[in-house]
Amino acid sequence: MNFEDLSFDPRIQTALKNKGYVRPSPIQEQAIPPALEGRDILGCAQTGTGKTCAFAVPILDRLIKIPPRSTDKQKIRALILTPTRELALQILESLEDYGKLLPLRSGLVMGGVSEFNQVKMLQKGVDILVATPGRFIDLVWRGHADPSFLEIFVLDEADRMLDMGFLPDIKRIIEMIPSTNRQTLFFSATMPPEIKKLTDTLLTDPVNVAVAPVSSTVDKIAQSIYLTDKADKLDLLVWLLKNHDNKMSHVLVFTRTKHGADKLCIKLRKSGIRSAAIHGDKSQGARVSALNDFKDGSCRVLVATDIAARGLDIDDITHVVNFELPNEPETYVHRIGRTGRAGRDGTAISFCDIDEKKYLRDIERVIKKQVPVIEEHPFPMTVFVESKPKQKQSRPRRPFQPRQGGGGNSGNRPHNNQGNSGTRQ
Ligand code: AMP
C-alpha cells in the first residue's frame, strides 16, 4: 500500500512526499483509514513506529474538510496530550511538516518554559494544540485555553503518562472536554489495568490497532550483556567507547537517576569523550542544546534518564547502553527501542552487576530470549555476593490535615512539574 491509496487531502499527500514518505508504516496502514472515517482508535504502538503521522494525518484531514463548530478562533479544535516536552516538540514539528500546505494553525503549551508566548499564541487562536498535561490545565483554569468545542482528542503515550503520575491530570482534562461528538485517538505501548480502564471510559467502539508487540520489536536489535562490578562500569564504558571508535558514533546511555546521569557525563568528558546529559532537572534550553549536539554529531554520547529519553526522535542512534539495568522489563524494551529505528540495525549493550542479575532474569522472561553474555572484556564481575538492601528510615508521620477550600481547584495548586517529580528521573 502507498499513501496515494489512502483518500486524504492531496496537500497532505504532497507534504508527505516531500518528507520522503512513500509507504505507510504498519501502524499508519491500520490506523489512518478508520481514523479518516471518524472512528475512535485504540493504538498499541510505541515511539518509532510512525504513530505521530498515524494520528496527525487524520486530524489535519478532518479539520480541513469539516468547518469548525464555533467561529470563535480561541476554541481549540484538536488537542494532543503527550507526557514529555521533547515529545511535544517533535509532534508539533511533524504537524507543521505534514500540514505545511494547509491553512491550519498548530501550537504548543508545555511546562518548564515561560508561558508568555504560549498565552499570546492562544489569544491569537490555534486549531491544533499539542500540550503536556500540567501546563494545559493551568492555562484552561486561567481562561487562556478553551477546549469546550474540541472535535479530536489524542492521548499519546498513555502508559508513560501513568508512570509519570499524570493520571489525575488526564482525568481532570477529560472532564474539561466535550463528552460526546468527539473523536478520540488513544496510543499506548502497553496496556496496564489503569490504562485499560481509561480506554473503556474514553473510547466509543474503537478500532484496535497494534504493531510490534513489546517482545518482537527487540528481535532486530543485537543485544548483549557485560557482567561486571558496579565500581567498574565507568571504566568498562570508556573502554568500549575507545575500542569501538568508529562503530559507536551515536550512543545513548541510560542511567537510573538524574544525579547518576550528571556524574557519568562529567566522568566521560574527563576521559576525553564528548558527552551531554539530559534529564528532568535540566532547563528546556539545556535539553534542546544537548539534543542538537547529539543529533549533529558534535557530542557522541548522550546520557539520559528514562523519562527524558522517552519519545526522542533520533533515528540514527547506533548503540543504547544500559549503564544500570532497569528493574522493570518494559523499561528495558523501551530503552533499547531507541536504537534500530526506521528499519536500521541497532545494538543494545547492558551492564549487569550482581545486584542486577534478578532484573536480567525478569527481562529475559519478558523478551522471551536469553541475552548473550560477552565474556571477553577487561572488567569481569568479581563481586558475587549481593549487597544488603538498605534499611528504609521510617519518617515520623504527620497528623492528617484536611484540605482548605473544598476541591482545592485553584490555579495556584502545586502540580507535577512535567517529569520533575520525585527524585529518580
Ligand atoms: P514516530 O513513531 O511517530 O516517532 O516516527 C518515527 C520516525 O519515523 C520519525 O522520524 C518519522 O519521521 C519517521 N516516519 C514516520 N512515518 C514514516 C513513513 N511512512 N515513511 C518513512 N518514515 C516515516
Image (cartoon, rainbow, N blue to C red):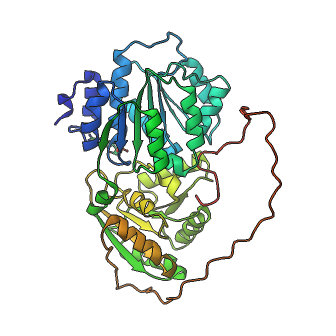
- From the viewer's side, name the closer residue of 181 and 118: 181
305 on left or right of 53: right
Q: Position of residue 354 (x, y in %)?
A: 49, 82
Residue 413 in which image quadrant = top right
- Quarter holding the C terminus is bottom right
In the picture, residue 339 is in which quadrant?
A: bottom left
Q: Is residue 364 visible?
A: yes
On screen, 379 above or below 190? below
Count of marks overlaid on the render: 0
Q: Is residue 1 above or below residue 223?
A: above
- Outermost residue, top side: 71
Residue 175 at x, y = what percent? 57, 29
Q: How far across and down, in percent of the image, does residue 271 sit?
A: 52, 74
Q: Is residue 300 visible?
A: no
**Image point 38% across, 20% down: which residue?**
63
Q: Quadrant of ligand 1?
A: top left
Q: Nearer the viewer, residue 347 or 189?
A: 189
| Residue at 32 percent of width and 29 percent of height | 35
Q: Position of residue 40 (x, y in %)?
A: 36, 31
- Point 35% across, 51% down: residue: 315
Q: Is residue 339 left or right of residue 292?
A: left
Q: Quadrant of the N terminus?
A: top left
